Image (spheres, rainbow, N blue to C red):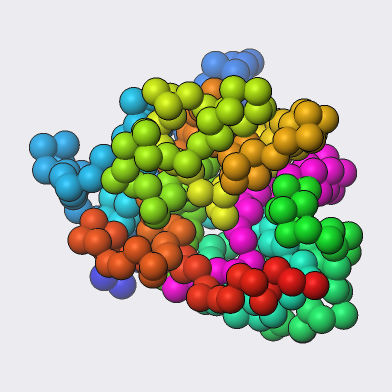
Amino acid sequence: MEIRDTFSRRRCYILAAFSFVFTFLFGWYGLKSSEWHPSIIFRCTVNKMVYAKPDVLQPPRTDVLTITPWLAPIVWNGFYNRDILNAQYHQAGVRIGLTVFAIKKYVIFIKDYIETAEKFFMVGHKVNYYIFTDRPNDIPNFTLAEGRSLSVLEVPGYKRWQDVTMRRMQMIRDHTRDRFVNEVDYLVCIDVDMVFSEHIGVEILGDVVGVIHPGFFGASRKAYTHERRPESAGYIAVDEGDFYYTGCFFGGAVEDIYKLTNFTHHAMLADKAKNMEALWHDESYLNKYFLSHKPTKVLSPEYAWNNYYGSPAVVKVKRLLHVDKDFKAVRSN
């Protein structure tokens, strides 16, 4: 292997020298650079990645849907090569932002959240953590890997938990416009009462990304808990809807997250003017957005699992888990 690598390097140096001379001679005789470039002659890569050839006749799995009717991939375990994906995104040098809201008593979850994220979320990539909180003094210090940073953003702690969850769309929108767009390429938004338990990497990145709710991935449209009142800005008819998307996890390119959060915030305000709230608050408005603005990538329930639903065979890996908690206790003042 060492001899082969040495030979490859030597061949690269020889071809590079030839290319330089060739470029000089053509430049001397007045050939325009737009008509020729050394890369046309050869491409030389010393380090190569070895992996099995994809076989279009042998899909990795046939037990689940892997693509939507609008040709967006549905990400399940076993359908991608992590090394290939990492190499592609490392070339682009992308930076990923992760937003999380630790409001009131929910601040108790932030320690496990960040510590498990450091083990499993975008390992080896550039990550900016953005913690929105009304209790900045309760955010502990964290030791982060190289290339990762953490910012604490102080925000109001609304009295009702419903207002906290809905107003977060406005806060994400405003910070995206004023700050995030200048700092990250992709933005991922995940609830604080969750822990990372397996690898979650660049396979989740896309322009607009939604996550199938673990309680509805095998359900009919009629069973979806969409907002059914026609007068609501979150209304979805019984015969509409592709999947039921969870509100605990969504993401996308930073510019697209601005559009998504702007839509959901204005939908909430429209209902508020009618003295209404959608059934499942920001989750209902998020599903409304995804009805007309189809996600370009859909994540399987592996990415937002709740042990309440057991261990179905198709969910081979539980990458992100809801924390068991006393809702009445953590939502009280």
- Residue toward you, 266 or 303: 266
Q: Is residue 203 above or below residue 132?
A: above
Quadrant assignment, res 7: bottom left
Q: Position of residue 137 (x, y in %)?
A: 87, 80
- For the question of whether residue 96 can be seen, the reply is no
Quadrant assignment, res 176: top right
In the picture, the quarter occupied by the C terminus is: bottom right
User: Magenta stretch containing residue 140, yes or no?
Assistant: no
Quadrant assignment, res 256: top right
User: Magenta stretch containing residue 181, yes or no?
Assistant: yes
Q: Position of residue 50 (x, y in %)?
A: 27, 57
Relative to 161, is 136 on the left or the right?
right
Q: Is residue 188 above or below residue 43?
A: below
Name the residue located 69 percent from the left edge and 62 percent from the top edge.
Answer: 100
Q: Is residue 317 above or below residue 56?
A: below
In this rendering, the count of numbered labels is 0
- Residue toward you, 289 or 113: 289
Q: Which residues are magenta?
A: 168-197
Name the residue located 73 percent from the left edge and 47 percent from the top edge.
Answer: 166
Q: Position of residue 78 (x, y in %)?
A: 26, 56
Relative to 186, is 75 on the left or the right?
left
Name the residue located 31 percent from the left edge and 72 percent from the top edge.
Answer: 2
Name the residue located 66 percent from the left edge and 58 percent from the top edge.
Answer: 98
Q: Position of residue 1 (x, y in %)?
A: 26, 70
As drawn, the residue found furthest toward the left would be 57
- For the question of whether residue 177 can be seen, the reply is yes
Relative to 67, is 254 on the left or the right?
right
